[in-house]
Image: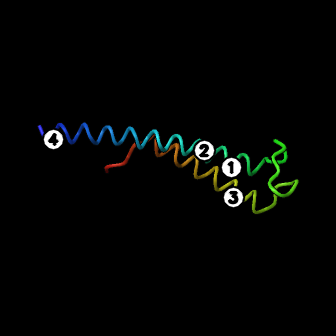
Amino acid sequence: MLEEYENKKRKQIGQMRSIMDYGMGVLMLVAGILFLFHDKFNIPLGNEKPTLLDQFFGGLCLLYGCWRIYRGYKKNYFK
């Protein structure tokens, strides 16, 4: 009985973490796209063209967003 409860609890926690990873991954992808292409979307971030720092940070956001989505897909939380 206790083992069944623990398995159910782990499954629920895994689902919640997966949803959180998907959501955070999408947010990070959007942030990366905005940093890389803010001049195309007419979003003022202090300068007209993306600087090297904007491009670097946007690239990091894209990589981290992809990692979060991958981690949510794999669901390797308790191994």
Three-letter amino acid code of the residue under disc 4? Glu
Residue at 46% in and 38% down: 19
Image location (x, y in percent) of residue 9: 26, 40
Secondary structure under the numbered disc 2 in the rendered image: helix
Q: Residue 50's image quarter?
A: bottom right
Secondary structure under the numbered disc 3 in the rendered image: helix
Three-letter amino acid code of the residue under disc 1? Gly
Question: Can you identify the residue that label 3 sits on?
Answer: 57
Which of the two labelled residues, at mark 1 and mark 4, occupies the earlier sequence position? 4
Secondary structure under the numbered disc 4 in the rendered image: helix
In the displayed structure image, the side of residue 33 where residue 4 appears, left or right: left
Q: Residue 52's image quarter?
A: bottom right
Three-letter amino acid code of the residue under disc 2? Leu
Residue at 43% in and 41% down: 18
- Whole-angstrom CA distance, mark 1 to mark 3, is 7 Å
Please, is residue 56 above or below residue 72 in the view? below
Question: Can you identify the residue that label 1 sits on?
Answer: 32
In the displayed structure image, the side of residue 65 where residue 1 appears, left or right: left
Which of the two labelled residues, at mark 4 and mark 2, occupies the earlier sequence position? 4
Image location (x, y in percent) of residue 35: 74, 51
Question: Can you identify the residue that label 2 sits on?
Answer: 27
Which of the two labelled residues, at mark 1 and mark 3, occupies the earlier sequence position? 1
C-beta proximity under 8 Å, tags 1 and 3: yes
- Whole-angstrom CA distance, mark 3 to mark 2, is 14 Å
Neighbours of disc 2 within 10 Å: few (<14), some (14-19), many (20+): some
Question: Can you identify the residue that label 4 sits on?
Answer: 3
- Whole-angstrom CA distance, mark 1 to mark 2, is 9 Å
Secondary structure under the numbered disc 1 in the rendered image: helix
Which of the two labelled residues, at mark 4 and mark 3, occupies the earlier sequence position? 4
